Amino acid sequence: MADDERAEELETIVAIYPELQIDEKDQFRFFLDIAVSPINPATISYPGSSGTDLDDENDRASAILHHLPPIKVDMTLPEGYPESNPPTVKLSDPSAWIPASKLKELEELATALWEDYGHSMIIFTYLDSLQQGAETAFDVPTTPTWALPTHDLGITLIAFNASSAQRIFDGETHDCGICLEPKPGRLSHRFNGCGHVFCRACLKDFYGDAITKGEVANVLCPDSTCGLRKIGPKRTRRTKRTIDPAELLAIGLDREAVQRYVDLKRKRKLEADKNMVYCPREWCQAPIKSAKYPPQPILEDISYASDTGDEGEAEPLAEAPVQPAPVPAEPATTTTAKEPPKPNKAPDDRLAICSKCQLAFCRVCKASWHGEYLYCLPRSAAELSAEDKASYDFVLLHTSPCPTCSVPAQKTYGCNHMICPQCETHFCYLCSMWLDPGDPYKHFSREDLPCQGHLWDAEDGNEEGAQFNGPRAFEAMAMAIAEAEAELDAQVGPGVES
Amino acid sequence: MAKRIVKELTDCTQAPPTGMKIHLLDEQDIHQWEVVMDGPDGSAYAGGHFKLRVTLPEDYPFKPPVLNFTTKIYHPNVSNDGKGSMCLGMLRSDEWKPPNKIAAVLAMARNLLLEPNTEDAIETTIADQYKSDRKAFEATAKEWTKKYASGK
């Protein structure tokens, strides 16, 4: 008859706890997980990394947890239960957040209850008391701060809390404020930041639409009260925080849309930057950030490099995707190298080089680069005309630039040894290279240079194409720097936009 | 989103917001609503019946509805150009949030009849008059109400 009593009690218990599992081999043994979601959420503090010293107060992370890992009950009703034998209970907690002594105490509670109730059926009473204990996290001091001994335990508990919260959310029904329909949690999305919930289909439509139309500033939580703060009796201010790209992917937007979102946001950020200039070429318009191209120091570096005869310094220039020979030590002994090459001491930060189309231009007057000596006035990009481009093209085609001051020089007649009318630098009309004023013609006899034997090319000056039409010296240098930077960027990885 | 519009319309016709009657301008088109709004008691518009047009854009509720007074009204927040348009608060596309509802928009509009928003006025001369010479403002508003909004 005792068997019947045990079976009868278990049947009742299974009805109350449908998730209860009866052991396959022993019909009077069962397993049950008691969920632990304390009434007062636990505030944990744990070592910030696995190597952190327990006492290091500076490196501790914290979190608030609403769900803790369950306590696992393994209960057996032995022969003779309930009359003569108490149930045997084994409690376990794989993540070990409950102290072993507490587990033991809870295990012993079964026998104590059995005694108290005069050897009667106590399974429900026992499980119920465990559940009640769970409401206070079995008296583990989880508030105000529960200091965990290890980093790993902190991570385990946080992960458990997150998955429990998600499971509960998925099982609930949420009213979507956009389609005004109740939607199951698994089709809904709760925003990481503010916790507002909408159905994913609506969010996808809303954000997809906003991104397609370029209205990235509208990619916000749609809730009408979200981010709203009272700043006066009748005034409110809204803090607008656009949604993180990762969250958009989680909502279900396709990669392409999210990429466009990231690009547009970046573009907006650039456009908001007052220091930003854009390539004045209408077909290019690429943004150029001033800090990226410190222009004038480059020229100085070169002269210093030549001064010390350190070819290594000048080396990278040779790799500029451009012109013929590496910059040699030609001007090393010239006046150019000994004296600062420019009269104005402040580095000319007007020079900008477009990273996309390589146009060198002045960020003040937006015309193609006119050299550092020219005084210019600000001009809006809108004023740039086809004339400017034509003029730049003409200059490229019919003149060679002075390697020091970049003044465009047009040869009317004579040999290709030029002296700059502006700064008296000696240079080659064919390749725009510095020439040694002491022996300028050596350049035209050096076997390692393409200008060998071409001193008198285009003697009457009007032969088109004889001029140096590659990048101006500063263009070549800026390009080399841009390239080096791009390479560096590629190594370091692109800057993460937040 | 037609479903949402129908739902809102059903709610608005079954339990109309205070002082309003709402119906579709054309039974075939759920994007055009016509509203008859009673001038709130205690305002210069009391006794008037103002007709409004609510136009829902194709991408409603992602974009705000458009509100026009088709009855002429003397008010700082309603354009006096024959269009009777309103553009403030949640009606502005940068302020609009998809969970906002038409009923709330209409309630806001009616509230503006009680309490004009002079900070965000579309008719600044009317707003100035409202602030500096309330009597003259109310006289004109009442006169217009009688003249244009006293019909059925």
Image: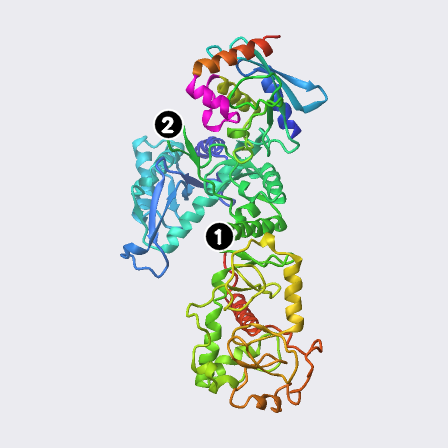
Magenta stretch: residue B132 in it?
Answer: yes
Residue A395 vertical placement versus A303 (above, below): above
Residue A403 vertical placement versus A73 (above, below): below
Residue A153 shown left or right of residue A168 in the figure: left
Give coordinates of residue B90: x percent, y percent. Answer: 52, 29
Q: Out of A342 and A474, give the one closest to the viewer.
A: A342
Give coordinates of residue A219: x percent, y percent. Answer: 54, 42
Q: Give, as a three-letter code, the residue at label 1.
A: Lys
Q: Out of A34 and A463, give the one closest to the viewer.
A: A463
Magenta stretch: residue A237 in it?
Answer: no
Residue A98 vertical placement versus B63 (above, below): below
Element on which disc 2 rests: loop
Q: Quadrant of residue A36?
A: top left
Q: Which residues are magenta?
A: B114-133
Mark with earlier residue (1, 2) = 2
Q: Give, as a three-letter code, the residue at label 2.
A: Pro
Q: Quadrant of residue A441?
A: bottom right
Mark 2, residue position: A233
Element on which disc 1 rests: loop
Residue B129 shown left or right of residue B12 in the figure: left
Residue A106 shown left or right of residue A251 in the figure: left
Mark 1, residue position: A274
